[in-house]
Amino acid sequence: MQNKLWGYRRPDGRMGVRNHVLILPTITCATQAAHQITQLVHGTVSFIHQHGCAQVGADYEQTFRTYVGLGTNSNVYGVVVLGLGCETHQAREIAAEIAKSGKPVEVVSIQDYGGTLMAIAQGAKIAAQMVQDASALSREPFDFSELIVGTECGGSDACSGLSANPAVGVVSDLIVDHGGTAILAETTELIGAEHLLADRAVDDKVAKRVYEVIQAMENRAIRMGVDIRTGNPSPGNIKGGLTTLEEKSLGAAAKAGTRPLQELIDYAQIPSKKGLVWMDTPGHDIEQLTGMVAGGAQIVLFTSGRGTPTGSPIAPVIKIATNTPMFEKMKDNMDVNAGTIIEGTETIEDVGRRIFAEIVSVASGKLTKSEILKQHDFGIWRIGPTF
Amino acid sequence: METVYKTVMMKPQDNVAVALSNIPAGTVVQMKCRGKIMTVKLKDLIEFGHKFAVVPIKSGEDVIKYGEVIGLAVKDIAVGEHVHIHNVEGKRGRGDKMSHAK
C-alpha cells in the first residue's frame, strides 16, 4: 500500500494538505466583506456565520478557541483576520493567538480602515501577497504520524452501521497503526454505545470522562423536558429505518474501529495524544465538522446514507455513501461508495483499504467533491446564550 | 414461498434483523448468523434498511440489535412484523418522561 503523503510544512512543524489563505471574519458584521475578498483574490477561503459578539464566559472561550484553531490549522498558509472593531471577539486578540504558530497573520478592521470598501481593498491587497507567497511553496513527503483525520456520519440510514461506518472503523485502525490520529466525535450519537468505548479507554480517567460527557449531553435533552427522538434520529434517519438514538449510536460507534481510546478532548481542542481520540461535539454535522477542523484535522471522512453536500472551507471532506442507489443518485456530492458491502461484492476491509488509498490521494492534492463545489460550511457549537 | 431477498442479522442474540431491499409481506426469508439459521415469514412490507422481528417481542421487553439494547417495545410484536417507531421507543434522552415535563 502506498503510504507516502505530500503536503506543506508549516513554521510550527505541522503538515498541511492544502495551502489556503483564510479570510477569517471574527464577527457577523465582517462576513460579507470577507466573502467579497474571496471573490477578488484567487486561493482565498472564508465562511459566513452569525457569531463573535455579545458572548460571555465558556461560550465566548469556545468560539474564540474555534476561530484560533481554524487559523492555526495546517491547511492554512496565512490568515487575514477581519473584524468590525467593537465586537467581543477582538480581531487583534485572535490574530495574536494565531501568530504564535509562526504563520503570516494580518488584521483588518472595518471601523479603523474607514468602512467596508476600504477594508475589502486593504484585506484583498494583503491576501493577494499571501497567496503569491503560498504558491511558491512546494509539497514535501510526510507520513501518517503527522496526520489528524476526523470521522463523522451525517444523514445516516440503516446501512450506515453495516457498510460505511465499519469501513471507516477499518480506516481508523489503519491510521492509528500507521502512527496517526483519528478523531471520533458527535457525543449525542454515542448515547447508548458509551459502555463499548469506555471499555476501550486507556485508563480509568478517560473512561470516567466518557460517561461524564455522555451524561452531560443526555441531560441537556432531559432538562428541556422532551424526548431526544424529536430531533435525533432525524426524520431522514427514521425514514431510512433507524428507530431510536441508541440504534443510531451503535452504528455510529463503528467508525471508531477497535483501537484503545487515548483521550477525550473538548470541542475545537487540538489532541495531545496520537491514536484514537474522542472530541466532545454535538451530532449536528456542521458544528462537529468545524470543531474537528479547529482541532487540527487536515482531512475528514464523512459517511452518509441519505446523501449530503457537506464540506469545509479548510479541510477536504471525503464523503462515503453507505448504499449504491444514493451514490449513483448523488455522484456530484459523494466521493466513495461503500454500498458494495451491502451487495456482497466487496468486504468491509476492501472498502476500508479503498478509503485509506483515497486519503493518500486527497492528502497529496486530489480534490474532493465538496471542494470542487465550494461547499464552505461552518457552524460553531454555542454553549451559552447571546446577550 | 422462500426467496433470495437479502437480510442481515448482526448478532445471534438479536431479536430483530434488517431487510437489504424492499421485501413484500408474506415473503419467507432466511437469516444466517454465526451458525444460527432462522426462517421468518414477513407479516408486513419491510422497506430497505428497516427491521423486522425474528422472535416474538413482548411489550416492555428490550429490542436487541448488534447484541445491544436499541430500545423498548411498547406493543407486543409478532415474528415477521415491522419493528420501528410505531412499536419501539428509545430509552435514552427521555426528558418527556421526567416529572418536570409538560
Image (cartoon, coloured by chain):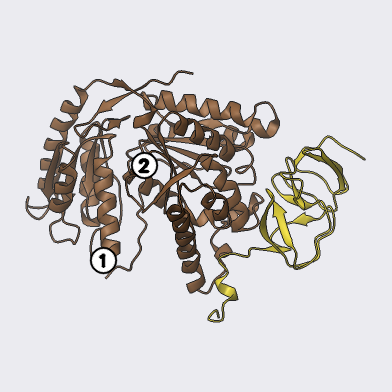
Chain colours: A brown, B yellow
Q: Chain of mark 2?
A: A
Disc 1 packing (10 Å; few <14; some 14–19; many ≥20) = few
Question: For the point 10% across and 42% down, which residue is it?
Answer: A122
SS label for mark 1: helix
Looking at the rendering, which quadrant does residue A132 occupy? top left
Mark number, residue A273? 2
Q: Chain of mark 1?
A: A
Task: Kindly identify the amino acid type of the residue bearing the numbered disc 1.
Answer: Gly
Q: How many marks?
A: 2
Task: Kindly identify the amino acid type of the residue bearing the numbered disc 2.
Answer: Lys
- On-image quarter of the C terminus of chain A: bottom left
Can residue A333 be seen here? The reply is no
Mark sitting earlier along the chain (2/1): 1
Question: For the point 38% across and 38% down, which residue is it?
Answer: A274
| Residue A141, x across and y down, in percent | 32, 20
| Residue A334, x across and y down, in percent | 51, 34
SS label for mark 2: loop
Q: Does residue A16 appear left or right of residue B16 in this picture?
A: left
| Of the pair A31 and B28, the residue shown nearer to us | B28
Distance in Å between CA atoms under marks 2 and 1: 27 Å
Q: Which residue is mark 1?
A: A57
Question: For the point 32% across and 49% down, which residue is it?
Answer: A269
Q: Does residue A357 appear left or right of residue A11 in this picture?
A: right
| Residue B91, x across and y down, in percent | 63, 65
Given contact means CB atoms under 8 Å apart, are the residues at marks 2 and 1 in contact? Answer: no
| Of the pair A383 and A44, the residue shown nearer to us | A383
